Image (cartoon, rainbow, N blue to C red):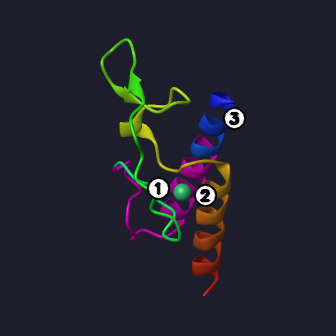
Amino acid sequence: MADEIDLANEQAERFLKQSLANRSTGPKLQPCGHCQNPNCELPFDAAGKDGEGHEIDEQGIRIDAKLFCDKTCADEYTELLRLRGRR
Ligand SMILES: [Zn+2]
């Protein structure tokens, strides 16, 4: 489960890096404790800590590295970027 969501986050991040590389300007996506999907922006709750003391959610994903709630939000965000890039 966690792997799947990690993968979605990684894919979204890769997509964003690509689009940023293509357009020299643009906001950089940084994990900031809530969902990066502007239609969601749900704050992430820490469910515990990992072995290194980092806050993690219930799926074991580090809060300080988390960009989206789940794949749905990651997909929605990449779709928004894609539409924006088309303008
Ligand atoms: Zn979300």
Q: Are marks 2 and 1 in contact (CB under 8 Å)?
A: yes
- State the quadrant of the N terminus: top right
Residue 31 higher or lower than 4, as above or below: below
- Front residue (pair 85, 31): 31
For disc 2, the marked residue is 73
Q: In the rendering, which numbered label is found on residue 35? A: 1
Specify which label sits upstream in the sequence, 3 or 2.
3
Label 1 residue near ligand 1, CB within 8 Å: yes
Q: In the rendering, which numbered label is found on residue 4? A: 3
**Secondary structure type for disc 2:** helix
Q: Residue at x 67, y 55 (%)?
A: 72
Q: Position of residue 77 (x, y in %)?
A: 58, 64
- Front residue (pair 44, 23): 44
Q: Which residues are magenta?
A: 10-32
Quadrant hosting residue 50? top left
Disc 3 to disc 2, how far (Cα)? Answer: 13 Å
Label 3 residue near ligand 1, CB within 8 Å: no
Q: Residue furthest bottom?
A: 87
- Looking at the rendering, the quadrant in which ligand 1 lies is bottom right
Disc 1 to disc 3, how far (Cα)? Answer: 17 Å
Q: Amino acid at mark 3?
A: Glu
Q: Amino acid at mark 2?
A: Cys
